């Protein structure tokens, strides 16, 4: 697709590195991450208009519904603004390079190496824990415990979601059968929650996480280590995309 001029004078789709197709598994989270890269690096600057939704959807190889959900979440977080009318569109509010601590909805992010260290460590621990849990012969009590932790994430106020989410992940760590692994996951979760608390809670991501949680739990209860590992990888990759987007 060739570069297209914008009558409002905003930036155009010229950066293939930013406007490349996203993976289907975590399309919402990766779209948020890509858009935040474009905004935070100034590819589309403060006050400029993002390209039309049709063109963005084509470049990202996603549906218009997914794109609208991603843009809506970024609007709620204060990064963009949607304007109607003949000269309307989605305009960038964020100033690249500006201090974000002044906005009460955001806190300064960690150093890039700290973020990547936490994500890599979490990936190594929690994917292994899910695989191990699915490999074990769980007792009826252990199975009920895991199922109850999953139900808790569905039946809670959004303000309590991250706490319930933590309990579910800690339960999977416990069911791995390794006390050392469970303790390491608990320690890493403290670091992770500090990062998660620095980014907005996105409704679409909660829905996505719930579906991924359900697949993880089903695989563990079904004794399917391969599927449990795959579901954990997908879930952790989605969270990593959002954290890199907002804090990277």
Image: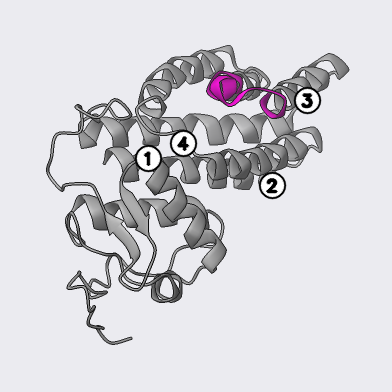
Q: What element carries label 2?
A: helix
Q: Nearer the viewer, mark 3 or mark 2?
A: 3
Residue 59 image position (x, y, % from top left) = 40, 74
Write down the residue under mark 4. Answer: 123
Q: Considering depth in this image, is 112 or 172 the residue closer to the camera?
A: 112
Q: How far apart are marks 4 and 1 (CA)?
A: 27 Å
In the rendered image of this protein, does residue 100 appear above or below residue 42?
A: above
- Structural crowding at the residue carrying mark 1, measured as other residues with C-alpha within 10 Å and reported as few (<14), some (14–19) or many (≥20): some
Q: Is residue 157 magenta?
A: yes
N-terminal of the pair, mark 2 or mark 4, is 4
Direction right: furthest residue: 140
Left/right of residue 109 with respect to residue 205 in the rendered view? left
Q: How far apart are marks 1 and 3 (CA)?
A: 32 Å
The answer to whether residue 17 is left or right of residue 152 is: left
Mark 3 and mark 2 lie on one chain; the one further toward the N terminus is 3
| Precedes in sequence: disc 4 or disc 1 | 1
List the residue tagged with mark 2: 227
Reading the image, the residue beneath label 1 is 77
Q: Is the magenta stretch mostly helix, strand or loop?
A: helix
Could you say which is closer to the camera, residue 159 or residue 120?
159
Location of residue 161 by image quarter:
top right
Mark with earlier residue (1, 3): 1
Residue beneath the point at 49% across and 39% down:
202
* Magenta part of the chain: 153-164
Residue at the disc numbered 3: 147
Badge 4 vs badge 1, beta-carbon distance below 8 Å = no
């Amino acid at each position: 697709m060739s570069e297209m001029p914008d009558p409002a004078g905003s930036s155009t789709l010229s950066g293939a590195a930013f406007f490349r197709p996203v993976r289907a598994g975590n399309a919402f989270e990766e779209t948020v991450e890509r858009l935040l890269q474009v905004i935070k690096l100034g590819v589309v600057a403060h006050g400029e208009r993002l390209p039309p939704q049709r063109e963005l959807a084509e470049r990202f190889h996603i549906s218009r519904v997914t794109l609208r959900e991603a843009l809506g979440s970024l609007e709620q977080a204060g990064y963009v603004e949607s304007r109607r009318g003949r000269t309307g569109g989605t305009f960038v509010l964020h100033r690249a390079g500006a201090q974000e601590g002044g906005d009460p909805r955001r806190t300064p992010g960690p150093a890039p190496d700290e973020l990547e260290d936490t994500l890599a460590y979490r990936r190594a621990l929690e994917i292994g824990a899910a695989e191990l849990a699915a490999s074990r012969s769980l007792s009826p009590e252990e199975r009920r415990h895991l199922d109850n932790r999953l139900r808790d994430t569905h039946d809670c106020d959004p303000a309590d979601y991250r706490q319930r989410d933590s309990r579910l992940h800690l339960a999977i760590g416990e069911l791995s059968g390794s006390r050392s692994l469970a303790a390491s996951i608990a320690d890493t979760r403290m670091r992770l929650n500090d990062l998660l608390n620095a980014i907005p809670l996105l409704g679409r991501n909660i829905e996505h996480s719930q579906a991924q949680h359900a697949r993880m739990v089903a695989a563990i209860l079904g004794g399917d280590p391969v599927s449990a590992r795959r579901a954990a990888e997908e879930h952790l990759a989605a969270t990593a995309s959002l954290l890199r987007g907002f804090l990277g």
